[in-house]
Amino acid sequence: MTLFNMTDVTVRLGGATILGNVTMSMEAGEIVTIVGPNGSGKSTLLRVLVGALAPNTGQLTKRDGLRIGYVPQRLQLDPTLPMTVTRMLRLRRKVGRPEIDAALSRAGIPELAKRQMSALSGGQFQRVMLARALLGSPELLILDEATAGLDQRGTAAFYQQIERVRTELGCGVLMVSHDLHVVMSASDRVICLNGHICCQGAPSHVASAPEYRALFGEGTKGALALYAHHHTHSHTTEAAE
């Protein structure tokens, strides 16, 4: 099932072309990651997708009634404001206890329901943001640099949780990330963006593409080795379980 189609989308802001003739689509159950340098239009593309920004030219069509869950890069909360995780999840809309419990469980943090938001670690905070995005059982989950500020272990654990969410809900997952090595092990497809789509495909294809190397440097060829290592390791782990 196709979730959305974006055809020749161009966005100009302040006279500058931020996105030029971007064409892409996504299927249900697919994990797609967008990588690119700062200023490459990654966040602009997400804004177009969620309807916050209209393209100057081109077309975006979404599946009728498409439910989208969104995990922002960073959400600022007043640390002096007493607020439990449960109360925070009820800010956007009225949701019942079963829905909150299910979202927290899917995010891997069922024990945090009564915890104060101000007492959460960075990793726990991002899991709460994930739970918030999962409240409506989304068909498309969008993550904008959701692991920014997390250490390598926390980042890997977060992506493993996303994989479980995808399996349980069957939703598509669209991520913007700078974690190139982890991206290679966590994605079905990678799109390399720099104002336009430079290259896209399976992680192994993109990691070895000259356009990707030109943007991220020769050191990124190590990403392919890490990709192979992660996949071998994950299959070995699954076999052992």
Image (spheres, rainbow, N blue to C red):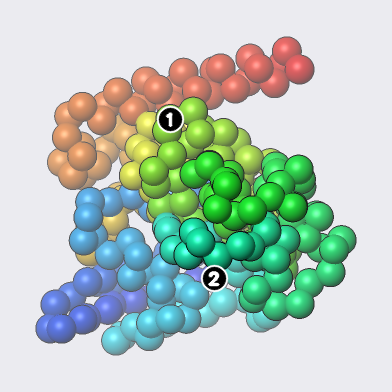
- Secondary structure found at label 1: helix
Which corner quadrant of the image does residue 6 belong to? bottom left
Residue 161 in the image: x percent, y percent? 63, 40
Circle number at residue 43: none
Return the residue nearer the eye: 215 or 78.
Answer: 78
Q: Which residue is mark 1?
A: 152
Q: Quadrant of the C terminus?
A: top right
Q: Is residue 2 visible?
A: no
Residue 108 in the image: x percent, y percent? 70, 42
Please state which amino acid type lies under the numbered disc 1: Gln
- Secondary structure found at label 2: strand
Residue 216 in the image: x percent, y percent? 20, 39
In the figure, is residue 18 to the left or right of 182? left
Q: Which residue is mark 2?
A: 4
Which corner quadrant of the image does residue 217 belong to? top left
The residue located at (76%, 45%) in the rendering is 110
Q: Quadrant of the N terminus?
A: bottom right
The residue located at (49%, 59%) in the rendering is 79
For marks 1 and 2, the one nearer the N-term is 2
Please state which amino acid type lies under the numbered disc 2: Phe
Which corner quadrant of the image does residue 19 belong to? bottom left
Q: For mark 1, does the 10 Å Cα neighbourhood hold few (<14), some (14 to 19), or many (20 or more) residues?
A: few
